[in-house]
Image: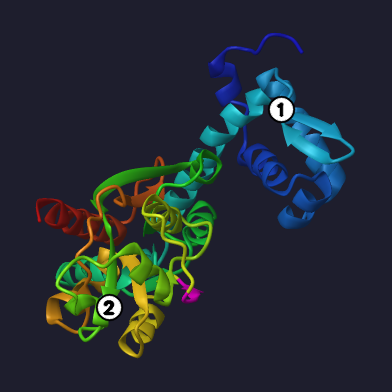
Amino acid sequence: MAAPPPAANILGRIRLRHLQCLLAVAETGSLRRAAERLAITQPAVTKTLADLESIVGLRLLDRGRRGAVPTPDARAFLRHAQASVDALGEAVRSVSPGADHRPVRLGVLPTLAPSVAARATLAWRTVCPDVPLSVVTGLNTALLRGLRERELDMVIGRLADPDDMAGLSFELLYAEPLVLAARPGHPLLHAGRPPAPADLAACPLVLPMAGTLIRHAADSFLGARGIVPRGGITETVSASLGRALVLASDALWFTPLSAAEADLEGGLLARLPLEAAGTEEPVGLLMPAPQQPLAAVAALAEAVRAEGARRRAR
């Protein structure tokens, strides 16, 4: 193709439909599926994309037997195209009837829900007492997908692979260690010394799900001490299930501190005296970038930041 025309000429000719078509093809990998998503014909998608390539003077898609794949030029263009479409959507929503009272949609890791999210929500309620709040818990990858697809306004979670972070910002709140929690009467708490690796290996363990960052930290902790679990492993990211299993048995719960801190402070659970240096994982606030959030969303983000600052200071 010829050299791209001047930017001023491009901006005056690009339309929303151009960006929507390109984004739909990039997300679905197919002209046909993009047409179905946009409820238009496939020839209309083809023509719109051809118009866009003519306007910018660049080939944006490589079409082959496996579908349509964005070119390197298109990948850079897509980041800004997504931001532009998102910003326009937020602008429309901000002046729509009831915009100030639509639910704020928060995604949070299950291990952070009873601590960070709960305290931030209570603080936010003093500022926005009448705004509905919808809270979704789940694995980090699912939460980030919901954030990218604008099903969520923000996520309290962790960093992910670069592909999962495209179009998102990560703001570090604090770093927290993993702990081994047990019921107060657990035999290993009364040995008068830190538990030996063999003793830990013999206990049932409640561990984070395989493939998660905190599971990687737990496996590294166990591997560095030569601990090969033989008492049975239960994998879960549910704080309520981990708590229940530990209270009812001699199982040990390998969990981020935030998931068990209320029970540890209240004496319902006890923390085994083990050095946890090196297990710290960053917890952050994730939001679409760039974004001009609604007032209630911005207020919740500030409450989350304040809770992060409190934990850093502690």
Which mark, residue 182?
2
Decide whether residue 288 is among the magenta residues. Answer: no
Give the CA distance from mark 1 to mark 2: 56 Å
Q: Position of residue 308 (x, y in %)?
A: 20, 55
Residue hosting label 1? 60
Amino acid at the residue labelled 1? Leu
Callout 1: SS: loop
Nearest the viewer among 4 and 198 is: 198
Q: In the image, what residue occupies the spot 69% across and 41% down? A: 26
Q: In the image, what residue occupies the spot 47% across and 47% down? A: 160
Q: Position of residue 9 (x, y in %)?
A: 59, 18
Q: Is residue 146 left or right of residue 96?
A: right
Q: Is residue 233 left or right of residue 217?
A: right
Res. 80 visible in picture? yes
Amino acid at the residue labelled 2? Ala
Nearest the viewer among 182 and 47 is: 182
**Which segment did they paint magenta?**
231-236
